[in-house]
Amino acid sequence: MKSLKILGPETMVVQDLPVPDPGDDEVRVRIHYVGICGSDLNYYFKGANGPNTVREPFSFGHEMSGVIDEDPSGTYAPGTPVTVAPASPGRPVAGLEAKPYLWPGSHYMGSAANIPHDQGGASEYVVIKRCMVRVLPESVPLRNGALAEPLAVALHALAIAGRSSDGIADRDLLVSGSGPIGLLVAGAAKILGARSVTSSDMLAGPLERARALGVDRTVRLDRESPDDSGYDVVLECSGSPRAVEPAIRAARRSGTVCQVGTLPDEDIQVNIAHLETKEIRYVGTFRYDAEIDEAIAMIAGHPRIATAVTHTFPAERAVEAFATARDSESSGKVLVTMWTD
């Protein structure tokens, strides 16, 4: 089989590897689509995502869809359309029984945190644990099914920010940063009944895509600012340290700021005085749990959310796909097909 492998900064090759055989508790999936995430961009352009450095040939991708190729148990028939829940929980922690995504020692497809690396989906075939399979409804094209994982991240963020899955209904939201995750957060918020959703960004392209998803207002940050104290919930999706303080300013008294975008693991200078004077709740969000099933249902019921996908490239043009995904003016979510033509 063919497999895309990152070897280091801006070095990617196609390797020919044996087709893997599934064990008793595993299935083999013929991958069709793989999404490029921010962590994948870091692995390709920098050779590392934070402290996790590429130290062996590494297949990117934790956002994927495909069809069952082989299931030794017979649970899933060949050709069954699926997406993948890419996490394997780590060691249980008392008090966190309901949050396995926070257990230490977890494994995540497309991560170089461990040796050997947890290989991602950028291959013709992958073998995964059977419990990681999520069947796609017949109405969901495989292209759209690749959005299930990032949409699950967005839905989890909205649940954390609203304190429950329906906690943002009839509330005014600001989504700071309109990259792929910001788009999915904004689009999902509209579907879940937010009273209003405002999307902000420094660039025009992302805001055009936010409007296509139905947001109520867009704010181009090089020309204007969001309303001070104007929002019940602010979801900071850019991961830029410079965006944290404006997010706090934009939250209403007793409002919530949810940090969705990954901040750099370093000291940053932020004025947080308004956290106290406005009694603002500042909360983080990390990955997801059951939200991947909710994401599949949302994609099936609201296919408009898939307009977050702007480009699809064949595996032979993966380098071009990464360059496009890094250009946030011109691209939303970028997918790569795994030799399916």
Image: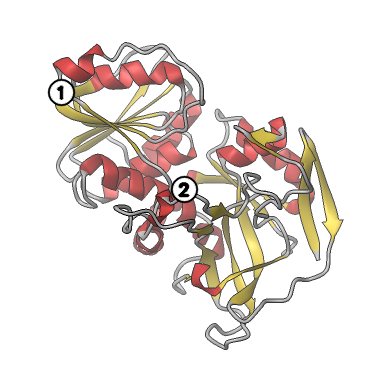
**Mark closer to the chain start, 1 or 2:** 1
- Foreground label between 1 and 2: 1
Q: Is residue 325 visible?
A: yes
Residue at 62%, 37% (x, y): give it. Answer: 325
Q: Residue at x 52, y 51 (%)?
A: 105
How many tags in the picture? 2
Residue 324 seen in the current view:
no
Residue 331 locus on image (x, y percent): 57, 36
226 with respect to 221 (left or right): left
Please identify the quadrant where the N terminus is shown.
bottom right
> Residue 39 shows which numbered tag?
none
Query: For the residue marked with disc 1, what is the amino acid?
Result: Glu
Image-quadrant location for residue 174: top left
Across and down, in percent, residue 88 comes to: 52, 60
Quadrant where the C terminus is found in the figure:
bottom right
Q: Is residue 323 left or right of residue 302?
A: right
Instruction: Please give the residue where the numbered disc 2 appears in the rendered image.
Output: 307
Residue 71, placed above or below residue 57? below
Query: Callout 1: few (<14), some (14-19), or many (20+) C-alpha neighbours within 10 Å?
Result: some
Q: What is the crowding at mark 2: few (fewer than 14 residues within 10 Å), some, or many (at least 20)?
A: some
* 241 relative to 2, above or below: above
Residue at image coords 71%, 51%: 59
In this view, the residue farthest toward the front is 94
Q: Nearer the viewer, residue 199 or 13?
A: 13
Q: Is residue 340 left or right of residue 238?
A: right
Element assignment for label 1: loop
Residue extending furthest right? 16
Q: Secondary structure at mark 2?
A: helix
Q: Residue at x 32, y 15 (%)?
A: 225
Residue receiving disc 1 = 279
